Image (cartoon, rainbow, N blue to C red):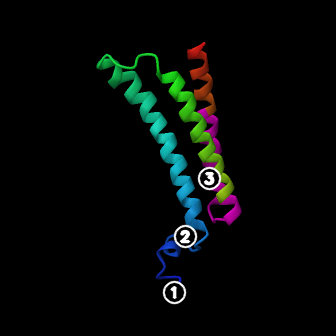
Amino acid sequence: MTAAADPATSRTGSPAEAPAERVFSTSVVVSGVRCFLFYVLFPWLLPAAGIASGVGSGIGLAIGAVAIVFNILSIRRFQRTRHRYRWLITALNAGIIVLLCALMVIDLNDLL
């Protein structure tokens, strides 16, 4: 099989870059799930149904921590594979980590 026919290399150019993209995708999905939970589900949908008032902050801390771990893993993987977009992805992940940290501070304040 040639490199052009291999699905792992057709998008990125290197088979080593495919796992890095999976970790990045996972980190973005975890961050997206957190945003959905805390900006749609917990403040609007569950209270409208009379469920889960006041549980958002504790869950937010846990999901935020998981999202930060996945973002750090994504940065490490992209840097290790020398992916062509490694600096762009590093900047994006770093921005997401900063926002998640700010949200975690807000969640901590809500719990106290």
Q: Main secondary structure of the magenta part?
A: helix
Cα distance in 3D space between marks 2 and 1: 14 Å
The x, y position of residue 37, in whole percent, is 43, 31
Counting residues from the N terminus, which is met first, the one under dot 2 or under dot 1? 1
Residue at the spot x=53%, y=58% of the render?
A: 22
Q: Residues within 10 Å of mark 1 (few under 14, many from 20)?
A: few
Judge whether residue 82 is colored magenta. Answer: yes
Cα distance in 3D space between marks 2 and 3: 16 Å
Front residue (pair 71, 63) = 63
Residue at the spot x=50%, y=70% of the render?
A: 11
Q: State the mark number for residue 12.
A: 2
Total residue callouts:
3
To which residue does mark 3 refer?
74
Instruction: Tell me the SS state at disc 1.
Output: loop
Front residue (pair 19, 85) = 19
* Quadrant of res 47: top left
Which span of residues is magenta-colored? 78-100
Inspect the image, locate mark 1, and give the three-letter code of the amino acid beneath it: Thr
- Image quarter of the C terminus: top right
The x, y position of residue 5, in whole percent, is 46, 82
Counting residues from the N terminus, which is met first, the one under dot 1 or under dot 3? 1
Left or right of 31: which side holds 85?
A: right
Judge whether residue 11 is colored magenta. Answer: no
Left or right of 50: which side holds 100?
A: right
